[in-house]
Image (cartoon, grey):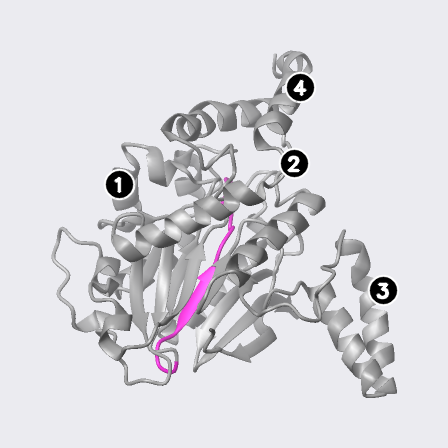
Amino acid sequence: MRKLLRKILLRPVLWAASRFSSRPNRERIFAALTSLYKDILEKPGDRGIVITCNPENDKFIIFSDQHKGRRNGADDFMLAEPNYLAALDHYYKADFTFINLGDSEELWENNLWQVKKMNKANFDAEKKFLLKGKYVKVFGNHDLFWDNDPFAGWQLRSIFKQKVKVYEGVVLQLAVGCEQLAVDSQQLAVDSHQSAVDSLRTQTPFSSMVGEPPVHIFLTHGHQGDAQSDGNWFSKFFVAKIWAPLQSLLRINPNTPAYDAEKKTLHNSIMYEWSASQQNLLLVTGHTHQPVFASLTHLERLYKSFQLAEKNKNAGDLQKLLDEIKKREKEFTAVAADYMTMRSTYFNTGCCCFSDGDISGIEIEGGEIRLVKWTIVEGVPERRMLEGMHLPLLK
């Protein structure tokens, strides 16, 4: 029956995917990001929270796009689970706050009951952060359930054994070069009716305390502006309740930014353009599964390093970089024309479901922001820093 339905509906479904998803739209994405960012700052606690923090002392790990499934052939997360559990154990012991940046559960291809049943260890590892008041959960387009289902709160309580509010975005407000102004979340009372992470919410704008505009790190999944997943209540309901189950039943996976290299590159480019047009802001997203650090993809960073090595006549580095460029070029469809002069305003976590089992994420610690990956080395998960830089005081 499935084969017959697939044969009949394949073309209409692919047409609809192309018609309603289409290419990333700059105007729509700009408007959606601007609206969300403004709403979080003006009405913290509704669509998102503002966390005032000292980047020298406070520590954050940002992972996205686990796409936890049900241990079948379509479960992209299954191979990455050992790295994910090892990473969460490391960051929990090191007292990091964990920001889970969307698409944590693959609820387009699976129902929640299946995901809950097969991922108890992963939910337990995340729950440990919540119990310390150091867990923030953001929804993405593949787990829109957390945003629009009337039973989402009850389901989260059944998983984590306490209330968990899910947001569309987070703003980290950095006390750069100042005394720590953030209230220590562990000193705040958290009653039985309040999520632990709500204790991190700041009610007083940082700018009013120090007289200068703050540096913001704006974090969201990155699907904003997607006609399928970021429209009105009906479009969200349609995707979550009809469109996604239909794709799962028919085993049809239309191209999305995560799987379409051209859309991935274009989407990241638009995200960079928006972030570069802001003042005192860094943007961190997921969604595309393509790591970006300081606005550059890995290939663009290699090209930039090659140009600098050539300028400095460093023959040894030139050959190494050339070899790596040849190896990586097939992974990318385009390179930004202005990669040598781009502002360091956009970061992408990558994902926690690479086909080789690796995971990548963004760390903020000790006044630095870093792109890291966890990979298996001789059977043991190992953390590797890919890129790092001091957090800039942007203008």
Taking 204 as reference, is 219 left or right? Answer: right
Q: Position of residue 226 (x, y in %)?
A: 52, 38
Q: What residue does disc 3 label?
A: 326
The amino acid marked with disc number 2 is Asn
User: Which is in the foreground here, disc 2 or disc 1?
Assistant: 2
The amino acid marked with disc number 1 is Gly
Q: CA distance from mark 4 to mark 1?
A: 35 Å
Comes first in the chain, label 4 or label 1: 4
Comes first in the chain, label 2 or label 3: 2
Residue displayed at 85% across by 80% down: 318
Q: What residue does disc 2 label?
A: 255
SS state under label 3 = helix
Q: Which residues are magenta?
A: 56-70
Q: Position of residue 123 (x, y in %)?
A: 38, 52
Local packing at callout 1 (Cα closer than 10 Å; few below 14, some 14-19, many 20+) is some
Q: CA distance from mark 1 to mark 3?
A: 49 Å
Along the line of sight, the residue nearer the viewer: 36 or 196: 36
Q: Mark 4 and mark 1 in contact? Answer it, CB < 8 Å.
A: no
SS state under label 4 = helix
The amino acid marked with disc number 4 is Leu
Q: What residue does disc 1 label?
A: 153
Q: CA distance from mark 4 to mark 2?
A: 14 Å
Q: What residue does disc 4 label?
A: 10
